[in-house]
Image: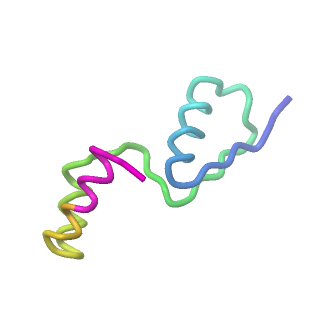
Amino acid sequence: MHVTVMGGSFGGFVAMAYATRHPEHPSKLVLWSTSARMNLARMLQRFEARGGPTARAAAERFWTDPDQ
């Protein structure tokens, strides 16, 4: 059986991992708002460039010490 695997944002990481582990399963892979890898240092630089130190600090807290 071939399925279409879809994933957005963090779900994109999950969909790519699934397709990598089971390449015979999906007939299609649909991804949006995701990336092939997560580079935290680069991502934090972009947050700071777009929103300043406050945006960087918020993103860093979110990715390193998430809470409600």
Question: Up-down: is 4 above or below 22?
Answer: below
Q: For the image shown, how many numbered marks are present on the structure? A: 0
Residue 19, how many percent across, how many down? Answer: 61, 33
Q: Secondary structure of the magenta portion, mostly?
A: helix
Q: Which residues are magenta?
A: 58-68
Q: Which residue extends farthest bottom?
A: 51
Query: Looking at the picture, how far across and down is residue 1, in whole percent?
Result: 86, 28
> What percent of the width, then of the height, locates residue 40?
25, 48
State the image quarter where residue 49 is shown. bottom left
Residue at horizontal 22 percent and vertical 58 percent from the top: 44
* Picture residue at 23% right of the left edge, 75% below the top: 50
The residue closer to the viewer here, 8 or 24, is 8
The reply, left or right, for residue 46 in relation to residue 32 is left
The image shows residue 23 at horizontal and vertical percentages of: 65, 27
Protein image colouring: rainbow
Relative placement, left or right, of 5 versus 1 is left
Asked if the stretch drawn in magenta spans residue 9, the answer is no
Relative to residue 48, is residue 10 drawn left or right? right
Q: Is residue 27 above or below residue 44?
A: above
Seen at 42% across and 53% down, the residue is 68
**Image point 19% across, 61% down: which residue?**
57
- Is 63 covered by the magenta stretch? yes
Looking at this view, name the residue that lies furthest to the right. 1
Of all residues, the one furthest to the front in this rendering is: 68
